[in-house]
Amino acid sequence: MSAEAGLHAAYLGLGSNIGDKAATLADAVARLAATPGIRITARSSDYRTPPWGDTDQDWFLNAAVGIETSLTPHELLEAGLAIEAAMGRVRERRWGPRVIDIDVLSYEGAAISDARLVLPHRFVRERVFVLVPLAEIAPDLRIGPETVTEALAKLDAAGIERA
């Protein structure tokens, strides 16, 4: 990234398991692209993934995007939350069904841990449904001590299919 321009590379994970999931992900990406201070630089394919955590729900469609942003990590989080709210996201139960989920996975090497944001995302290296699409667009991205590819190699990707 160009330090002079104040741009930072970041990666976001997206997921949906309510309604027209593919249209929802496309809408979320369009809304991100329309947000001042965000430019989409890469978008993974969509992946059909089984539910994780709370497994008594419909399958998910997941994707990842790479961006350049002039927003701070916290501003980027707020932008994602605003898009979720505008798209009808309701947080009823932990790991439950959602029309859209937008997670900040990584922000150009930032290490943050506060009440609002943990970067890199605290579960990114444990969640194959995040790593598979992320590996498509950023296989060499370092998340903590290892690359996306190295983290993915430790997990079982059974049940995850390109949509």
Image: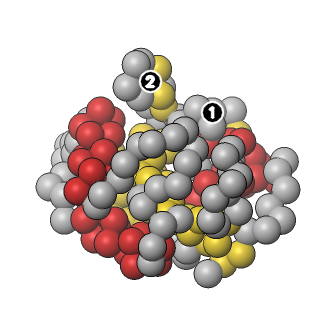
Image quadrant occupied by the C terminus: bottom right
The residue shown at (18%, 52%) is: 37
Give the residue number, with chain letter if any, for mark 1.
144
Figure check: 146 above or below 100: above
Residue at the limit of the structure toward the top, as seen here:
114
Name the foreground residue: 124 vs 135: 124
> What is the total number of numbered labels drawn onto the structure image?
2
Residue 13: horizontal and vertical position, in percent?
A: 49, 54
Q: Can you see residue 117? A: yes
In this rendering, would 160 be left or right of 74?
Answer: right
Provide the secondary structure element on which disc 2 rests: strand
Provide the secondary structure element on which disc 1 rests: loop
In this rendering, would 137 be left or right of 129?
Answer: left
The residue shown at (69%, 54%) is: 56
Figure check: 51 above or below 90: below
Residue 71: horizontal and vertical position, in percent?
A: 23, 42
Residue 94: horizontal and vertical position, in percent?
A: 54, 38
Q: Amino acid at mark 2?
A: Ile
Name the foreground residue: 21 vs 4: 21
Give neighbour class at mark 2: few <14, some 14-19, many 20+ (Cα, 10 Å).
Answer: some
Residue at the limit of the structure toward the left, as seen here:
36
Give neighbour class at mark 1: few <14, some 14-19, many 20+ (Cα, 10 Å).
Answer: some
Figure check: 34 above or below 116: below
The residue shown at (66%, 78%) is: 162
Give the residue number, with chain letter if any, for mark 2.
112
